[in-house]
Amino acid sequence: QVQLVESGGGLVQAGGSLRLSCAASGRTFSMYPVGWFRQAPGKEREFVAAINWNGTTYYQDSVEGRFTISRNNAKNTVYLQMNSLKPDDTAVYFCAAREGGSAYSTLTQKMNYKYWGQGTQVTVSS
């Protein structure tokens, strides 16, 4: 069993930065692919970024070059550094983890994740 807790959300002006953290319990967390998703009001939860066990990363096109996902396995934590934030980035951000395969096509689909955090609100003002 894995429990995930997100933190680091808040209110920031357009162009600013935030770093989200996803802290996990569980001894084997370092072997789990982890993804970040976001959900804006009235919209579907969408893929943002993912990182697999060996550090390979994947990004949604709209955040490529602005967001960076990383992990510190010694701390059982995955990070999402968000720079050059835009009002369209406003959403609740969730981290998620899965056991098993880590292909791009798998990691970009929310249905493939078994464990989810409670989410953290990110609001970007214009």
Image: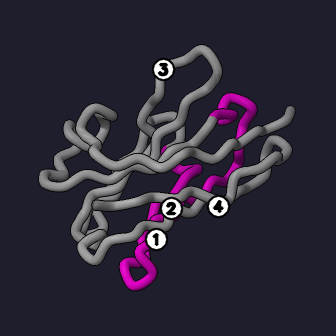
**Residue displayed at 63% across by 47% down:** 120
User: Is residue 74 at least partly visible in the picture?
Assistant: yes
Looking at the image, is mark 4 or mark 1 nearer the viewer? 1
Q: Mark 2–mark 3 contact, CB under 8 Å?
A: no
Q: Secondary structure at mark 2?
A: strand
Kind of residue indicated by mark 3: Glu
Looking at the rendered structure, the secondary structure element under dot 3 is: loop
At x 27% / y 57%, what residue is drawn?
A: 33
Foreground: 90 or 114?
114
| Residue occupied by mark 2 | 22
Q: How far is mark 2 from mark 3, CA to CA?
A: 21 Å
Q: Is 84 within the magenta?
A: yes
Question: In which quadrant will I find the C terminus?
Answer: top right
Counting from the top left corner in percent of width and height, residue 60 is at 43, 38
- Identify the residue at the far bottom of this view: 74
Q: Which residues fall within the magenta stretch?
A: 64-91
Q: Label 4, on which residue?
A: 19
Mark 2–mark 1 contact, CB under 8 Å?
Answer: yes
Q: Residue furthest top?
A: 42
Distance from label 2 to label 1 (Cα)?
5 Å
Q: Is residue 49 left or right of residue 108?
A: right
| Distance Cα–Cα, label 4 vs label 1 | 12 Å
